[in-house]
Image: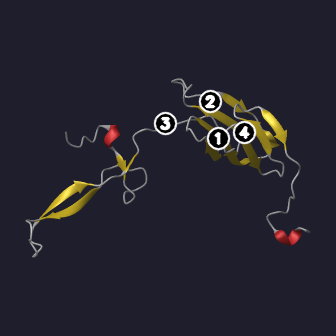
Amino acid sequence: DGYDPEDLSQQVFDEDAPSGAARGRRRRRQRGGEGDDDGGGEEEEEAAPALPVSHQLVLSAHAKTVTCLALDRAGNRLVTGGSDSDLYFWDYAGMTRELRPFRHIAEPLGAYQVRSISYSPNCDRVAVAGSSNQPVILDRDGRKLATLMKGDMYIRDMRHTRG
């Protein structure tokens, strides 16, 4: 009934530990008799609540660095975009042991890197923006619905815009 270091469901993240380390944290509590004002009681260690890190998996599909990701509200679908200019759609409910995405979209923004992905509030659409100044809208299955108008390429520096 105690702590088993081999049981992954009992591992917790400790922010004081080095990166990647998982171990339990303990909180000290002083134990003494009722009305004991001198503080001379024994100290007792009690487990403090912590963030579990027992459920993790590696999703590898991108050829280069993953630069952004979006998880739908229900937590069932994940979209990842990266420096390879590609998008991958992952469905946790339908995923097999091979851990492969259900949809791959090669270069939805052309050869531009994907910088931002966001689900709509009702999770039926995905907005994808990148290094280009023309974002695209996809449905939740990755089919292109629209390419937005070309935006102002100097929007990051207001000195170069008029209006």
Q: Earlier in the sequence, mark 3 or mark 4?
A: 3
CA gap, disc 1 and disc 4: 14 Å
What is the C-alpha distance between the residues marked 3 and 1? 15 Å
Which residue is label 1 attached to?
A: 80
The quadrant the N terminus occupies is: top left
Q: Are marks 3 and 1 in contact (CB under 8 Å)?
A: no
Quarter of the rendering containing residue 98: top right
Asked if labels 2 and 4 touch by Cβ distance under 8 angstroms, the answer is: no
User: Image point 20% across, 63% down: which residue?
Assistant: 29
Q: Which residue is mark 3?
A: 57
Residue carrying label 4: 125
Residue name at image x 66 percent, y 41 percent: 122
Look at discs 4 and 2 and give the one toward the viewer.
4
> Of the residues under marks 4 and 2, which one precedes in the sequence?
2
Q: Which of the two labelled residues, at mark 2 and mark 3, occupies the earlier sequence position?
A: 3
Q: Position of residue 58 (x, y in %)?
A: 52, 36
